[in-house]
Image (cartoon, rainbow, N blue to C red):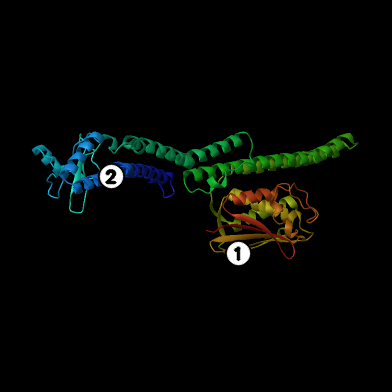
Amino acid sequence: MPNRHSLFWKLAILVAGFCLAMIGASDYLGTRIDRQTSYLSHEARSLLEGYADEAAAALQRGPGALERWRQDMRQREAGWLVVVDRRLNPLGRQELSDEERQSLTFVRPYDWPMSRRSAKLPLIALPVDAAGTQLIMRLPERMRPWRNHALLTLFAVYLLPVVLSVLFCWLLFSLLIAPLERLRRQANAVRGNALDTLVPPSIAKRRDELGELGRSLEYLTRRLRDAVAQQQQLLRDLSHELRTPLSRLRVACESDLGDTELRDRVEREIGSMQQLVDNTLELAWLDSEQPRFACQPVDIHALWELLCEDACFESGWPRERIRSALPQDCQVLGNLNALAQAMENVLRNAIRHSPPHGCICLSAKRAGDEWRLSIEDQGPGVAESELQPIFRPFSRLSAARPGGSGFGLGLAIAHRMVRLQGGRIWAENGNPGLRVVIQLQGV
């Protein structure tokens, strides 16, 4: 069943309204045309009223004058006429046949509507005086009503539906075709790599199927634009980052270093470039594929112990300098590998920027149905304006946090890993140091 914002209801209302409007308008105009065209014209009524006045004047002068007037009327109007009293008896010297007397029962007043059902012209009655005397005559052909009936009926029955159909098509075009044409232009713009063109707000704000299509197309346009921009930025940053180790390799090859020193330098630079390429490819994969990690309960105690063991082995830190203050029931809903990589990147970043003999501590706090895991070091921290940019790729704040030797990809990868698990990650300045908070659904 279509929802209440569906185009189905708009089209149903439009079609039903069109049909009802066409039927109602045709019926109303047809009735009005039949009624208005069945009355005598103003000129015809004035002329007939003049005949009645002449009959009244002749009747006052006597039967002879009435007969002369009647003979004169035969010269002017070819139809039959008679002057009768209130009992329909003829006045003057005129005699009526039985058929003529019977026809007097079908007389209608001259100011009434005339019927078109009779093949003959109707008999009309005009009042002559206040005593009920009437002039009854056959309506002259030239005074026949319904002169424009056929033309007006043509307008009401044929032309009006055509006009309403054009209006209906215009409304249908405005409702469906025009928005689809705009969406087509938007799709062609995307095909032509014009990614700055977005769907007009008039379509994006609609709540029907076209609005959903417009919002989907706008989302795809933004997503494609962001992906292209990120890939271009990654390529620029990657090419920039690769110049430094390549330059060092060139200098090392051109110098007088011994074989052992040269081999160590080459291995160090190759390892650095390998790490850079691997991290960049991983970041590009996360941005382009947007994978959805399968989540399951993860014990933070066990995960942190494993991460600390690896970090101490790689960095040479004593184990007692990496501490934890975790509640016993600290379990989150996440992907083990993705969460381990995110926390490992944050931990390595903290070790890299910690002062000599500094400590790192992991703590956790319950916030409703979620856990907030905080990894805090004792370094100098960063400026408040840089708390968000540190999660961008190749963002390195050496001036604020000295001692860094990475490429600025660790926190960017951690940010995407946490977000793809349905969580959040942000940074805060501690007292002293930097605190990175990871918020995930609790178990």
Q: In the image, 278: left or right of 241? A: left
Residue 83, relative to residue 386: is it above or below? above
Residue positioned 64% across, 55% down in the render: 425
Secondary structure at badge 1 equals strand
Q: Amino acid at mark 2?
A: Gly
Q: Amino acid at mark 1?
A: Lys
Distance of mark 2 from mark 1, alpha carbons? 108 Å
Residue pointed to by mark 2 = 50
* Residue 18: percent from left, percent from top: 38, 42
Residue positioned 62% across, 59% down in the render: 373
Quarter of the figure with residue 195: top right
Whether residue 157 can be seen here: yes
Residue pointed to by mark 1 = 365
* Residue 225: percent from left, percent from top: 64, 41
Q: How many marks?
A: 2
Quarter of the figure with residue 355: bottom right
Secondary structure at badge 2 equals helix
Contact between labelled residues 1 and 2, with CB atoms less than 8 Å apart: no
Q: Which mark sits nearer the N-terminus, 2 or 1?
A: 2
**Label placed on residue 65:** none
Residue positioned 53% across, 49% down in the render: 205
Q: Residues within 10 Å of mark 1 (few under 14, many from 20)?
A: some
Whether residue 110 can be seen here: no
Quarter of the figure with residue 74: top left
* 254 or 90: nearer the viewer: 90
* Residue 109: percent from left, percent from top: 22, 46
Nearer the observer: mark 2 or 1; the answer is 2
